[in-house]
Amino acid sequence: MLSQLVINGIIAGSIYALIAIGFTVIYRSVKFFHFAHGIVYTVGAYLAYSVISHWSMGNSYSSMGNGQSSIVIGYWVLAVLVGVIGAGILGIGIDRLVYRPLRERKASNLIFLLASFGVFIFIQNLIQLIYGAQILTIRTGPVKEGHHFLGAVITNIQILILVVTCLLLVVCWWFIKKTKLGKAMRAVSDDPVAANVVGINPEKIILYSFALGSALAGVAGILISLETNIEPTMGFSAILKGIIASIIGGIGNIPGAVLGGFFLGLAENLGIWKIQAGWKDAIAFGILIIFLLFRPGGIMGKRDN
């Protein structure tokens, strides 16, 4: 039982970490809580679902031959690309149409937060209008038995989620630390005025940050839709867990966001060892309150004196 909870915690933590790192990339550039990041995550899943459902209407796994496997792979690649690119474009659109005019007016962080929440609700209702409120699934094909590992069961989908997430986290860390654009993002995060003086355009960096962070949210939405069902409200819980993970690790700290995501995933799942699974959210918010009271800078943030 314990080993299964640990495996589940690692899988959940990998998704939380992916959401948190996308949220953190954006937060470092704009310095406010981009709550609409959760709906970008949802849109990524629904766009991928649209491609797969369009293909599934005229095909079924039971009637397919071996020669058609390449077609299936092609549709899945297309679905992922549509979901990720669509999420990136949506993130850019939110910034250009909503946040940039507010930046030009020197709006307060509270105004940004309210605008972000408004965007979230608007797009969530738009998704519900287009797809309906019912629960949908992106999963296709027969259900296969998982692999037994150290007394726990892990499925192929869970292995895929963990591998893809870990690869993306490493690539994202390398991009931020080693590339010219990543260094420009760090410069704008540290001091946008000084960055502008040396020739770095903060608005262009913000655009790139929204593209990258939103694309990561789209990947997270697609990955979790392979494991669970999708619904219009799925982004609300996701962004809350992403924000909590970011705060636990140290708000604005990318390695901290990863650490916070895995910490939260393990804490939630180990916390329900002896109690009902419905207490997961309570455990997450309990951990958040503890960190806000005793370590507001997070695990990798600066300790307040």
Image: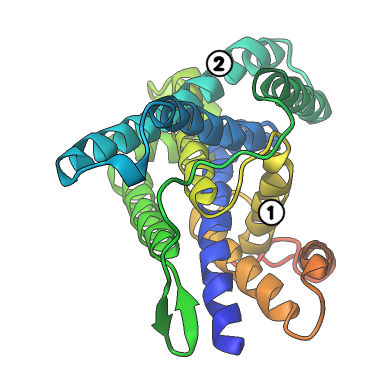
Along the line of sight, the residue nearer the viewer: 169 or 54: 54
Tag 2 or tag 1, which sits nearer the N-term?
Answer: 2
Q: Residue at coordinates 63% horizontally, 58% vertically from top-left? A: 250
Where does the image place residue 279, in percent across and percent down from the top left? Answer: 82, 69
The three-letter amino acid code for the residue at tag 1 is Lys
Tell me the SS state at disc 2: helix
Q: Which residue is mark 2?
A: 93
| Outermost residue toward the front in this view | 63
Residue 260 shows which numbered tag? none
Above or below 165: residue 137: above
Q: Is residue 251 above or below residue 199?
A: below
Please state if 134 lies on the left or on the right of 1 as rendered: right
- Please tell me which residue is depicted at 38% across the width and 35% down the height of the picture: 80
Q: Name the residue at 67% across, 63% down.
A: 248
Where residue 217 sits in the image (x, y, percent)? 52, 40
Measured from the top left, where is residue 46 in percent x and y? 55, 31
> Looking at the image, which residue is at 54% across and 26% down?
193
| The C terminus: image quadrant | bottom right
**Front position in the image: 166 or 95:** 166
Crowdedness near tag 2: few (<14), some (14–19) or many (≥20) residues, C-alpha within 10 Å: some
Q: How busy is the neighbourhood of tag 1: few (under 14 within 10 Å), some, or many (20 plus)?
A: many
Residue designated by label 1:
241
Residue type at numbered disc 2: Gly
Label 2 near label 1: C-beta < 8 Å?
A: no
Answer above or below: position of 208 versus 259.
above
- Whether residue 191 can be seen here: no
Look at the numbered disc 1 and give the secondary structure of its residue. Answer: helix
